[in-house]
Image (cartoon, helix red, strand yellow):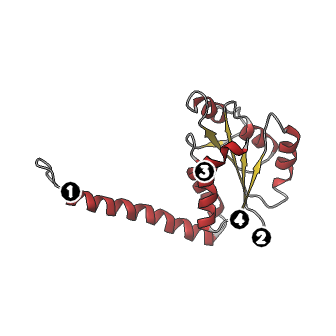
Amino acid sequence: MKPLVSIIMGSTSDLPVMEKAAEFFDKMEIPFEMLALSAHRTPRQVEEFASQAKERGIKVIIAAAGMAAHLGGVIASLTTLPVIGVPIRSSFDGMDSLLAIVQMPPGIPVATVGVNGALNAAILAAQILATGDNTIADKMENYKSSLTDKIVKANEELSKIEYKFKTN
């Protein structure tokens, strides 16, 4: 089984956040790989990864990094594959990471999710894959329906809670 998605982390200290993406891909049965690569500490390996990802069959790259957070931008500069950036909360409550990922120069887009937004990154990657894969598209339809069902159920449960001045 060949991976369709690469989850790249600046270091393994990002794994507790990025596990949410891995768990989602397992649930959706989407093959993925996880690597620790650093734009600053392993630039040659990042360049090698990015230049070979497409020919290896990777369709989407998720790049997670904290602080200076250049990983996603560097990868995006070296490939035409979609890159999704996950800013990791570190110093400055993750704002430094968020701004480093979201403020890219023209021609080097990195789709950016919220701070520590690994799950949303995985969902976006799956939605990108679903444009060309009906099986994944069906799974995503079911997933989105389950989100609706959870809220409908929560609303029903709220309606049963009584307060003296509650009107519904």
Q: Residue furthest top?
A: 92
Distance (Cα) linking label 2 and label 3? 22 Å
Q: Which mark is residue 31?
A: 4
**Could you tell me which residue is drawn at 33 percent across and 62 percent down?**
152
Q: Amino acid at mark 3?
A: Ala
**Mark 2 or mark 1, which has the lower sequence index?**
2
Q: Residues within 10 Å of mark 3 (few under 14, many from 20)?
A: many
Q: Amino acid at mark 2?
A: Met
Residue 106 relative to residue 160: left or right: right
Callouts 4 and 2 close, C-beta under 8 Å: yes
**Mark 2 or mark 3, which has the lower sequence index?**
2
Callouts 4 and 1 close, C-beta under 8 Å: no
Q: What residue does disc 3 label?
A: 121
Q: Amino acid at mark 1?
A: Ile
Distance (Cα) linking label 3 and label 1? 35 Å
**Mark 4 or mark 1, which has the lower sequence index?**
4
Q: What residue does disc 2 label?
A: 1
**Could you tell me which residue is drawn at 59 percent across and 49 percent down?**
118
**Mark 3 or mark 1, which has the lower sequence index?**
3
Q: Residues within 10 Å of mark 1 (few under 14, many from 20)?
A: few
**Residue 139: x, y in percent?**
56, 69
* Looking at the image, residue 165 lies above or below residue 126: above
**Could you tell me which residue is drawn at 73 percent across and 48 percent down?**
8
Q: Residues within 10 Å of mark 4 (few under 14, many from 20)?
A: some
Q: Which mark is residue 23?
A: none
Quarter of the image that includes the N terminus: bottom right
Q: What residue does disc 1 label?
A: 161
